[in-house]
Image (spheres, rainbow, N blue to C red):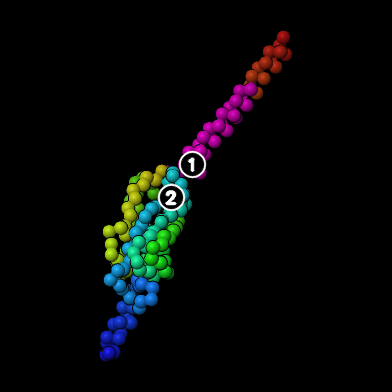
Amino acid sequence: MGRGLISILVLLSTLTAFCYLPGAMAGPTDEGADLEIVHVDFSTSHLMKGKMTSVELLVRNNGPSDCEQVTITFHDGDELVGVVVIDRFAAGTDRTVVFSWSPAEGGAHRLTFKIDPENIIYETNEVDNIKVDKVSIGQSSGGLGNPGDVYLLAACGGYILLGMMSAWGLLVWRRKKLED
């Protein structure tokens, strides 16, 4: 082989994430992988502006080939939120990937998750490599990010009001008693 061809092969082997069958040489196979984002889940059902949230992805390799250096990206609109790389992803297995996210703005957000975003890995099905989720982010309420927090505050306020009314009633009763 000539030096130029060897250089090209070395360059391709360093830039490409390979899928391979057990016992076969590393490199693309005809059978390939089938990477899929199965499910997206958030650590809370009430997403709030400025509040840290864990975003958990269940990803699967449905194909008969193992893969290496599998990249998964998370975008909020056009902004890249995070990148995770799975060193080795065995055929027929699931993996859980977790991103941390703190939405900077309230309102509607379009979240995009991609597995193998650059299409480096040879796959039999590329259609299931992307998952788009539209979410609504609430405005932060000064530390009351949970509806349960609001109910707790209302209950505490009610008890305080009840206590104040009881104290006032006691004072009125005592004053009336002293006047008699």
Q: Tell me if residue 101 can be seen.
A: no
Query: Which is more foreground, mark 2 or mark 1?
Result: 2
Q: Quadrant of the N terminus?
A: bottom left
Q: Is residue 21 left or right of residue 149?
A: left
Image x and y of residue 34, in percent: 32, 63
Badge 2 amino acid: Phe
Check residue 42 in the rendering and tell me which mark sits there, or answer none: 2
Image x and y of residue 20, in percent: 35, 72
Which residue, as the protein is rendered here, is positioned at the far bottom? Answer: 2
Task: Out of 7 and 140, give the one closest to the viewer.
Answer: 7
Task: Out of 39 and 63, give the one closest to the viewer.
Answer: 63
Task: Out of 22 and 170, give the one closest to the viewer.
Answer: 22
- Residue at image location 27% in from the left, 86% down from the top: 5
Determine whether the residue tagged by mark 2 lies in a helix, strand or loop. Answer: strand
Image x and y of residue 22, in percent: 38, 73
Q: Is residue 116 above or below residue 10?
A: above
Q: CA distance from mark 2 to mark 1?
A: 14 Å
- Residue at image location 46% in from the left, 47% down from the top: 44
Kindly indicate the quadrant of the structure image that contains residue 153: top right
Determine whether the residue tagged by mark 1 lies in a helix, strand or loop. Answer: loop
Region rendered in magenta: 139-166
Badge 1 amino acid: Asn
Image x and y of residue 138, in percent: 41, 43
Q: Is residue 132 above or below residue 32?
A: above
- Residue at image location 32% in from the left, 53% down from the top: 132
- Residue at image location 27% in from the left, 59% down from the top: 127
143 within the magenta span: yes
Check residue 146 in the rendering and tell me which mark sits there, or answer none: 1
